[in-house]
Amino acid sequence: MEKKEPKHPNRETALSYRANAGESEEMAEQLKTMIREMPQIEPPARLLTSVMETVKTKKRPFWFRAYRWARSPRTITFTPLLPVTVMALSAILVFSVFFLHESKNRNITLAESRKSIPVEFALDMPDARSVYVVGSFNHWVPQPCLLHKDNDSTRWLLTLQLQPGRYEYAFIVDGKRVPNPETGFNQDDGFGNKNSVLALGKEDDI
Amino acid sequence: MTFRRLFLCLLAFVVAAAAPVVLSAQNDQTGVTHAVALAVEEARQAGVPDETVSRLLSHGYDNRVEAASMANLVSFVATVKKEGLPLEPFVSKIEEGMAKRVPAASIEPVLNQKKPDSLFTRSVTADYLKKYSLRQQVTPEDLAGIAENLNSGLSRQDLVHTIEQAPAISLFTLKRVIGVQASLKRVGFDPKLSDRIVSTAIEHNFFARQRRGFVRAIVAGKRKGVSDEKITDAALSTMQSGGTVAGFCSQIGVSSSDM
């Protein structure tokens, strides 16, 4: 009784692959031999240059590179401490700028004009907590005409850019209206108080 | 169900009781608002710029001026415009009063005094121009500037007297002369000596040219204790010799830092 070896398709494929692999190795060896036996041919002198010129990419303008960089996704890793620090520094920066702006803002333009005349309002009142100047030039509204005083000074100061003309004004010292004690030009306001008088430009000719 | 019916009855009663009160208040409010609207319309028709009206209304709102008072003030401004007087001194005075929280009832008398002063000033300046056949326009600034002196110490008699003795000079120079007289009166300068300074200034046409700081020098000298007589003597000699303000200052011992 002849014992038939059962046909197994996977096994056939494996044998076939093994045969193919053997053939490939053989061919590879033949190729290597052929390459070794090939004569040495020097490449043309300009080959490298011409290849490099062909593959060389054109330099893009800066804005395009920046745009492309900005559009490219990035992966950034940071600890929670970083955004907290950045926010704290930003807040300090914003407050510093605001504070510096406020403390240096002693020159206010109420009417933009080429004829504007800078007028310095000054009041020697070291114990006052706040001093504003109100008058017909700002429709008697205190904001934003707050006078400032340096720590080492006793004088409150503010410079306003005003149009030529005649104005009446008063200071508001800690909420109380007072005329300028340093000028002799005061007059009744009609309501039982005194206003100081300020003349600018042609009105100041006398 | 009974509770619901009871609630509806109660609600109906509350509405019925409150309706007359609400309607009455609404009518009052509507009436007052209508008065403001009428005053605003009157002002616009008179030619008051919208910006001025808005400024006044905004100021009134900020300072909680009652609507009825606001209507009166806007109406007053319309009247000033109809009379052809400069608006700014009146509007500024209203703003000043409102900002100082002066009741509208106390602002109106000040305005009512200002208006005849402006009309009087316009009349005497027109007579002055007519007297010398001067073809000059009385600008709102000149009129307001001269009239303002009546609110700051100068009497109508003083004004008439100064204008009567003035020769044919420009209205601007006349305004300066009147301004000097008012300033001297404000600082309590001797009236007779003040008259001498003014009449000499007119005689020598001293204020036709720029004399910046002349009055400030007088005030500074007075503050430093220089007598009115000495100031007058120095002023008269300066005017008669055609001198300068700097020379006048050195005569009375006033430096630029004093001014």
Image (tube, helix red, strand yellow):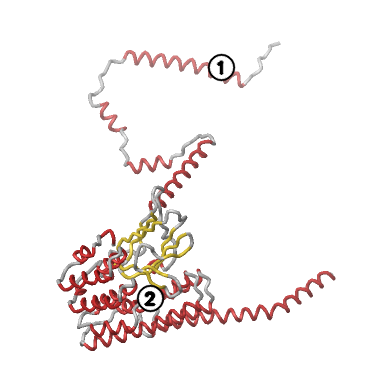
Left or right side of A12 for B58: left
Q: Residue at x 39, y 14 (%)?
A: A30
Residue furthest to the top: A1
Measured in 3D between alpha carbons, the distance from the residue under mark 2 to the one under mark 1, in whole angstroms, is 115 Å
Query: Of the residues shown, which amino acid type is indicated by label 2?
Result: Pro
Q: Which residue is identified by label 1? A: A15
Residues B224 and A127: in front is B224
Do the residues indicated by labels 2 and 1 lie within the same chain of the protein? Answer: no
Report crowding for label 1: few under 14, some 14 to 19, many 20 or more residues within 10 A (C-alpha): few
Left or right side of B243 for B43: right
- Chain at tag 1: A
- Under circle 2, the secondary element is helix
Residues A204 and B224: in front is B224
Residues A28 and A196: in front is A196
Residues B34 and A183: in front is A183
Which quadrant would the C terminus of chain A be assigned to in this image? bottom left
Q: Do the residues labelled 2 and 1 touch (CB within 8 Å)?
A: no
Q: Of discs 2 and 1, which sits in the foreground?
A: 2
Question: Residue B110 is drawn in which quadrant?
Answer: bottom left
- Chain at tag 2: B
Q: Residue at x 27, y 58 (%)?
A: B257
Whether residue A198 is visible, yes or no, is: yes
User: At which x and y percent is residue A155?
Assistant: 38, 54
Query: Of the residues shown, which amino acid type is indicated by label 1?
Result: Leu
Number of disc labels: 2
User: At which x and y percent is residue B77?
Assistant: 42, 80
Please tell me whether residue B160 is drawn above or below residue A61 in the rendered image. below
User: At which x and y percent is residue B192?
Assistant: 28, 78
Q: Which residue is identified by label 2? A: B89
